Amino acid sequence: MTAPVRFPRFFVTNPSPCPYLPGKSERKVFTELNGPHTDELNDALGRIGFRRSQNVAYRPSCLDCKACISVRVISDEFKPNTTQRKLIKRNQDLVVQACEPWATEEQFALLQKYLSKRHPGGGMTEMDEMDYSDMVEQSPVKSFVVEYREPTEDGSKGALVGACLTDQQGDGLSMIYSFFDADHPDRVGLGNYIIMDHIMRARKAGLPYVYLGYWVEGSPRMNYKVRFRPLERLGPDGWLRFTPEK
């Protein structure tokens, strides 16, 4: 008798410099996502802290550090604070659409602008259009690109100011990668708004969680993730609520 789901084979990368904590090295364990039960496998791995990149699921497996912690927002209980309510009101005129996962020149141009502003010198700045197409389109699971556009008076397609590659898992939305116009004079905080829009989308769809990836205590680049509460983190005893110290 053949088992309905073959147990995945896992591999480990060689150590490399950590992009979040100076002086640390990172190592990842990963497996390929393929076969007829890929969605179920991705869901199961997501619940134990894996993230997806194209057709691979991975999570940190560092030898001397456990700073990377998986976090997720409880969508149904999220209540925006005063600053977040103002941010929602400021951006409620944006035209938001969940699109099929097809890469466009407009998206890639926005990504390049975002990376040059927020992550200059980072590894992703070397991506070309083919690399971006692979990131978006090589998805073996249910994915979409949520686009955020400026409104127009005639209803035509407005300028793209934000986008997020998102997976829909069985218990929530997993934000794979988001990018936006970080220089827009009237859209300060757009990245935070994209997260809140995903929380509202998950709530409307009856999905209990929004997965934000890894939070790294001590890394300023990751501080924004703890602004969305209630928040759960994955530890030895499973997913538990926590309130990070300010």
Image (cartoon, helix red, strand yellow):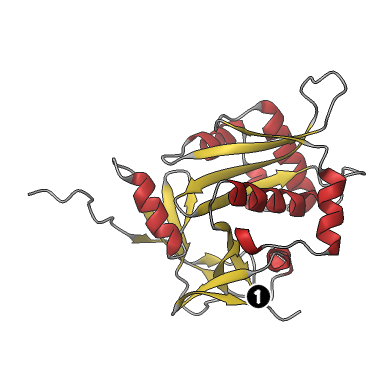
Q: Is 104 placed above or below 246 here? A: above
- Please provide percent x and percent y for residue 196: 71, 53
Quarter of the image with the C terminus is: bottom right
Camera sees residue 64 = yes
Residue sitting farthest toward the left = 1
> What residue is rendered at 28% in x and 57% in y?
9
- Please provide percent x and percent y for residue 212: 60, 59
Left or right of residue 37: residue 59: right
> What residue is rendered at 64% in x and 72% in y?
21
Mark 1 secondary-structure assignment: loop
Q: Is 181 placed above or below 230 here? A: above
> 33 and 131: which one is in front?
33
- Please provide percent x and percent y for residue 48: 43, 65
Camera sees residue 33 = no
> 83 and 179: which one is in front?
83
Report which residue position mark 1 lands on: 217
Q: Is 58 placed above or below 164 here? A: below
Q: Amino acid at mark 1?
A: Glu
Left or right of residue 173: residue 81: right
Q: Residues within 10 Å of mark 1 (few under 14, many from 20)?
A: some
> What residue is rendered at 83% in x and 37% in y?
93
> What residue is rendered at 75% in x and 54% in y?
192
